[in-house]
Image (cartoon, rainbow, N blue to C red):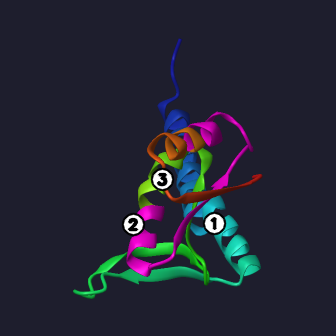
């Protein structure tokens, strides 16, 4: 059995080209988290991607997904709920606002329950809202 290496290389380069185009398309498309945070922030009347700085040094601390008159909000996909805990507390500390997490996922699903358990166990001053994907 003879292998036509010319045809193999053509198929190989076509696959690589298609994968490259898919990678470029995924870079250009906004992530679901950004879409949800923009939408939630607009509905809440807040400022999206708010620049948070250290009050004394002026050093950039990060960008809160949304800041309203009451909350410093971190919007996060449910599987990364644990990252939202630290970020929301840090943004609240530096803005003087209350911490809030907007979780993109299933209400009372396993990740939401894990988040609520951590907040309750450590008595963290964080409010939680769940929005469906």
Secondary element under disc 1, as helix, strand or loop, is loop
For disc 2, the marked residue is 90
Label 2 packing within 10 angstroms: few (<14), some (14-19), many (20+):
some
Magenta highlight range: 88-115
Quadrant of residue 57 within the rendered picture: bottom left
- Give the mark nearest the N terminus, 1 or 3: 1
Mark 1 closeness class: few <14, some 14–19, many ≥20 residues within 10 Å: few
Which label belongs to residue 29?
1
Q: Is residue 99 magenta?
A: yes
Task: Please report the residue visible at 64 percent of the width from the left and 54 percent of the height from the top.
Answer: 103
Q: Residue at x 27, y 88 (%)?
A: 58
Q: Quadrant of residue 106?
A: top right
Q: Residue furthest left?
A: 57
**Circle nearer the viewer, 1 or 3:** 3
Residue 102 x %, y %: 64, 60
Identify the element where label 3 is drawn.
loop
Measured along the vertical axis of the image, is residue 111 above or below residue 128?
above
- Residue 62 location in percent, x, y? 39, 74
Residue 17 in sight from this viewpoint: yes
Task: From the viewer's side, name the closer residue of 22 and 132.
Answer: 132
Q: Earlier in the sequence, mark 3 or mark 2?
A: 2
């Amino acid at each position: 059995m003879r292998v036509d290496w010319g045809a193999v290389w053509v198929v190989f380069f076509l696959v690589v080209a298609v994968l490259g185009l898919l990678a470029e398309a995924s870079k250009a498309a906004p992530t679901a988290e950004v879409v949800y945070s923009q939408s939630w922030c607009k509905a809440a009347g807040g400022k999206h991607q708010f620049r948070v700085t250290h009050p004394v040094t002026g050093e950039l601390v990060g960008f809160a997904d949304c800041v309203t008159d009451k909350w410093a909000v971190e919007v996060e996909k449910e599987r990364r709920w644990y990252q939202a805990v630290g970020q929301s507390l840090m943004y609240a500390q530096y803005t003087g606002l209350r911490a809030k997490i907007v979780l993109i996922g299933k209400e009372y699903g396993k990740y939401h329950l894990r988040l609520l358990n951590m907040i309750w166990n450590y008595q963290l001053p964080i409010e939680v809202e769940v929005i469906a994907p």
